[in-house]
Structure formats: structure tokens, C-alpha cells
Amino acid sequence: MGYPRQFTSLVAQISKFPGVSRRGAERIALFLLNLPEKQADLLIKSIAAAREKIRRCENCFNLSSGDLCAICSDDARDPSTLCVVETAKDIAAIERSREYKGLYHVLLGKISPLAGIGPEELTIEHLIRRLKGGDIKEVIIATGTDVEGEATANYVARVVSEAGISVSRIAYGVPMGGPLEFVDEMTLGRAVKGRRRINSGD
Amino acid sequence: MGYPRQFTSLVAQISKFPGVSRRGAERIALFLLNLPEKQADLLIKSIAAAREKIRRCENCFNLSSGDLCAICSDDARDPSTLCVVETAKDIAAIERSREYKGLYHVLLGKISPLAGIGPEELTIEHLIRRLKGGDIKEVIIATGTDVEGEATANYVARVVSEAGISVSRIAYGVPMGGPLEFVDEMTLGRAVKGRRRINSGD
């Protein structure tokens, strides 16, 4: 009661969006109702266009508008280094850091026995084929730091080692730009274990 | 770099949704990409249908699919009591409590001098016309508890008093269902000031 049927239906669908509560869905639905005609048309067309045009890169499973994604088809990238991530969002995050010039491989998830996701549900089979291609000299693993991310990193590390290729993991430690007192103990422990010698004169 | 153009454009539009961060917009955009065809169609049609069918009730400015909203056209509601709220979302919240059987009036906002919103930007003119209609015997004000909500309550209370109609405000106090230690001091102060005598035997 209180809301028209069409509004309740819209709110129900928006509450399924990730990270959006029922209350947040009501706010977003009201926002969509009040959106100027032109912007509403653009939004609807953008959803349709993105769904129609965007697929997975055949090489690395990044989001792509062609057979190969913008990174795999860029000749300036170093094809001897491969960074393994869980999702395409992680690629965007690493690209923003501008520290990495190699290629990527998106696993499309992480190993999670509780959710019924084993290695065969991920793109590891395809990763092994890429490793056998011969171009790749180093693999950098950049999975998450939760239990599933750790398990996935361990599994991928073994697969890469077995292929006789050098494997490393990005450094996990204290984040930049804040006082140490706010850093949790897990992160601090990891930062101490991963300490690096300072060469005077550096 | 990293994302196809169509994806970046979709993310930019979703980041304008209220309460959605850039990172949240990326997650929602990925969710929309992976949505099964049928659900995506339904979502797009629901947005269009809601925008086409839903308007404001001519009487109380609640969301409505006809000239009058479901509440104003319900004969079982008590037309002598009027509850004044800021937005249609507040109606939905009060309806969920099942404690109120009267009608509503949506102000479509709150008085906010800093944002350039005075009483004339709200539906107060229309409220005064309703008060003059003669049916309404009591007005209950249920605006927010921020500074603007308080100012709006004071303004509406004066308008209603000047029309010679009884006016009250919903009780503000300690929320139900939790220990007192987590209640902030403003709320506790308000709860003490608004204390009610207990009749033994109640």
C-alpha cells in the first residue's frame, strides 16, 4: 500500500543490484522517475548498447568490444609478463596505478568450495594454454586477500610453477597515505613479514 | 584504458544514481551486463512503464497511477486526519507501521534556505487550500529531524494553527529494539523531554 504497482515492481528489480538496499532502491527508483526524458533515454540505450556490444576478450577474458580487448590488441604492451586477476574490475584498478605494462588474465572469479566454485569453473584451463604458448616469461598473481583469494593464488602459483615459468605475487602491506595506528593487525603482520631491505643511497 | 567505451559510458551514468559510488557503479554495470536477457528486458520495460504511468496524486502529491493515489481514493481512510511528510518514501515508511489510518500531504521537499528552497517551492499553498476545505480536524507533522526538517515543521505548524486546526508532531525519541547505550545524546535528550506519565495498571 502507498506505492503504485509499477513503482513497487521497479523497486523490487533495483533491489537486486549489488550493494543496493531496499531503501537505496527506492531512492534510485524515484531518481529514475524524475530524470529528464533525454537522460532516461540515454540510460536505457546505454544499458542495451553495453549488453549488445560488450563481450569477453578471447585471449584474457577482459571486457571487450571486439575479439581482442584494448590491452591485448595494444602492441606497446609487454607480452612476456602476465598479471592474473579475479575480475575485469581489478584490471581497471591496476591500470589506474599506471605501474604495469604487461598483459592480463581474468579468472572470472575465485576458488570457493562453499559456493561450489572449483578451478574448473574459472579460466585456468585457458591460462594453461596461454602459458604453453611460449611468450610468457613471468606471471604476477594479484588476487584478493580473503580466504578464497589466497586459495586461488596458491592454486594458480602451482599451475604456473609446473609450467616452468617464474611466478610472483603483488606486495600486500600497509596502504599508502595514512597513520599506522589505523592499519589492522593482519595487514601489519603481512607488512612485517614482507619487509624489504633498504639500501642506503637509494 | 582497460574498459570498452560503452562500459565506461554506462558506469558514468550509473554513478549519478543517489548513494552509488564510482566503484558501486562498476559493480552494477557488470551486473547489468551479466543479467539474463529476459530480466534485462523486464528492467528496461519497468523503467519506461514507471516513467510513463506514475505521476503525482492531484490531492496529496503521493506517487500515483491515476488522478488520485491509492490512499486518497480509499473510502476506508479517515479524511479528518492529515499527516504531512517530506516525500512519498515517508508515506511508504508510515504505512508499513500500520498505525495510521488518515490521509497524507507530501511537501515534495523541505525548507532549505542554503539550497534556495523556501516555502513557496513546496506544496504548502496546496496544503492551505486543503485545510480550508473543512474536512480536516487534525494535522500530524512527520518531517525529518535535521535542521531543515525542524524548520519545515515549525513553518507548517504555524500555517495549520492559523487555519484554526489542531496540529501535533509524531513522537521523536529512543528507537525500539536496542540497548540505550547506543542511542545518541540528541535523541536521548529529546526522549527525556518528551517523556510520558505511566498510569499504573496500563
Image (tube, coloured by chain):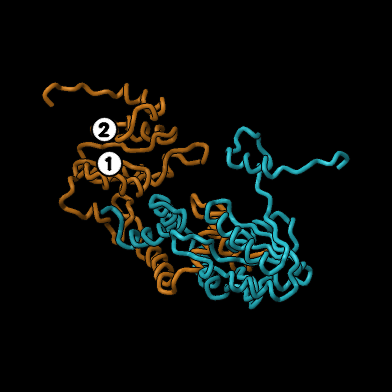
Chain colours: A cyan, B orange
Residue B115 visible, this angle: yes
> In the picture, which quadrant includes the N terminus of chain A?
bottom left
Mark 1 vs mark 2, CA separation in Å: 10 Å
Nearer to me, B106 or B131:
B106
Kind of residue indicated by mark 2: Val
Report if the CB atoms under discs 1 and 2 are less than 8 Å apart. no
Chain for numbered disc 1: B
Nearer to the camera, A138 or B22: A138
Same chain for labels 1 and 2? Say yes or no.
yes
> Which residue of the protein is positioned furthest toward the bottom in this rendering?
A67
Which residue, given by chain and number where applicable, does mark 1 sit on?
A: B83
* Side of A184 relative to B109 (left or right): right
Classify A23 as above or below B43.
above
Circle 1 or circle 2, nearest the eye? 1
Residue on which disc 2 sits = B167
- Pick whichever of labels 1 and 2 is earlier in the sequence: 1
| Left or right of residue A166: residue A158 | left
Q: Residue B32: x, y in percent?
A: 49, 66
